[in-house]
Amino acid sequence: RPRVLSGIQPTADSFHLGNYLGAVRNWVTMQETHDAFFCVVDLHALTVGPDPAQLRARTRASAAQLFAAGLDPERCTLFVQSHVPEHAQLAWVLNCLTGFGEAGRMTQFKDKSLKQGADRTTVGLFTYPVLQAADILLYQADAVPVGEDQRQHLELTRDLAQRFNTTYGRTFTVPAPHIVRDTAKIADLQDPGAKMSKSASTPNGLIELLEPTNRIVKKIKSAVTDTGREIVYDPENKAGVSNLLTIYAALTGRTIDDLTAAYDGKGYGDLKKDLAEVVVAFVEPIQQRTRMYLDDPAQLDKLLAIGGEKARSVSSRTLARAYERVGLVAAA
Ligand code: ATP
Ligand code: MG
């Protein structure tokens, strides 16, 4: 079985529809066909300076949502990044192989640091993609299921793996991106040119899996649409309506063509009303199961401890090999 690894940040109380359709949904399918490792990347979340109690709560809530969405501890390895110290350890080695300019070219860093201002931007945010490379390479992943927004980071991971292998001898598998075309990018409902994002979207642009369903309905009804009245799929010129169609198709399994045919002659209001129903029906069971996991934190922590152990059995071997390759003396 090919190996996959992917991660998600505990940077919000709830995941959003973009996280689900762009990432989590594929994870659930991949656990059947792949040797799958998934992690809640709490070390990455530190780059935005979260409140400690909030980070702890969000880390557990993230894991709960992943189990609720269908990740099965018997079929995949789900763990918390900080439970596996090798991530930070390998990241250091890779930091020493990464060019300063190379890291500076990452567009997510440029975007996020621009928003924060130079004085508030941390070195952690700067080296974030290097830690991400460590996350992936530790598991010798063949593929990394991610949204379109992560393509550049994955390219860096591949470069670092190749550089390490060339310099020190073959050590890491060079991973391929696994990007699911149709839903690779879900847009912000209020700003359809931008991606839906936990940390960067306006509250009304974001559909959270765990938010009250009446709020979801309101947000969909007030989603920005476009001039004109026809329901057509045209991401260039009608980004708002196209985004709604993408979500609709992804959640129902219907094709875009089928949907545009069905809404021929109808208005944006009809589309939004029906889509709101589809989304509510989708989130309700996830909300219920998430609550079930959160109601028993001891059991949740136990599942995560098991995942952490499984992860370490792989990551410790890779780290030992990498340390040896670069010339660190093994502890006696
Ligand atoms: P943050 O704003 O904190 O970076 P995020 O919403 O970008 O949060 P991440 O935790 O960085 O979420 O990413 C988790 C996964 O979700 C990644 O695989 C990423 O590609 C995917 N993802 C994030 N936003 C979207 C989106 N709008 N559409 C599709 N996939 C997305
Ligand atoms: Mg992100």
Image (cartoon, rainbow, N blue to C red):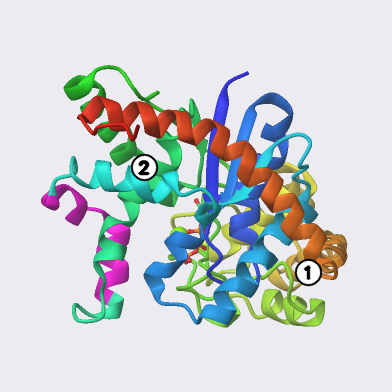
Give amino acid for label 1.
Answer: Ala
113 within the magenta span? yes
Give amino acid for label 2.
Answer: Ala
- Front-most of residues 243 and 186: 186
Locate the N terminus and report the quarter of the image it occupies: top right
Q: Is mark 1 within 8 Å of ligand 1?
A: no
In the figure, 53 relative to 270: above or below? below
Q: Position of residue 68 (x, y in %)?
A: 79, 55
Element assignment for label 1 = helix
112 within the magenta span? yes
State the residue at coordinates (37%, 68%): 47
In the figure, 188 relative to 264: above or below? below
State the residue at coordinates (65%, 80%): 222
Residue bearing mark 2 = 133
> Is 85 displayed left or right of 268 in the figure?
left
- Front-most of residues 274 and 267: 274
Q: Position of residue 45 (x, y in %)?
A: 46, 66
Q: Which mark is residue 276?
A: 1
Q: Which mark is residue 108?
A: none
Range of the magenta residues?
100-114
What secondary structure is the magenta-colored segment mainly? helix
Disc 2 crowd, CA 10 A, few/some/many (<14, 14-19, 20+): many
Earlier-in-chain disc, 1 versus 2: 2
Q: Nearer the viewer, mark 1 or mark 2?
A: 2
Element assignment for label 2 = helix
Q: Is residue 119 visible?
A: yes
Query: Distance of mark 1 from mark 2, alpha carbons?
Result: 38 Å
State the residue at coordinates (32%, 59%): 108
State the residue at coordinates (60%, 72%): 56
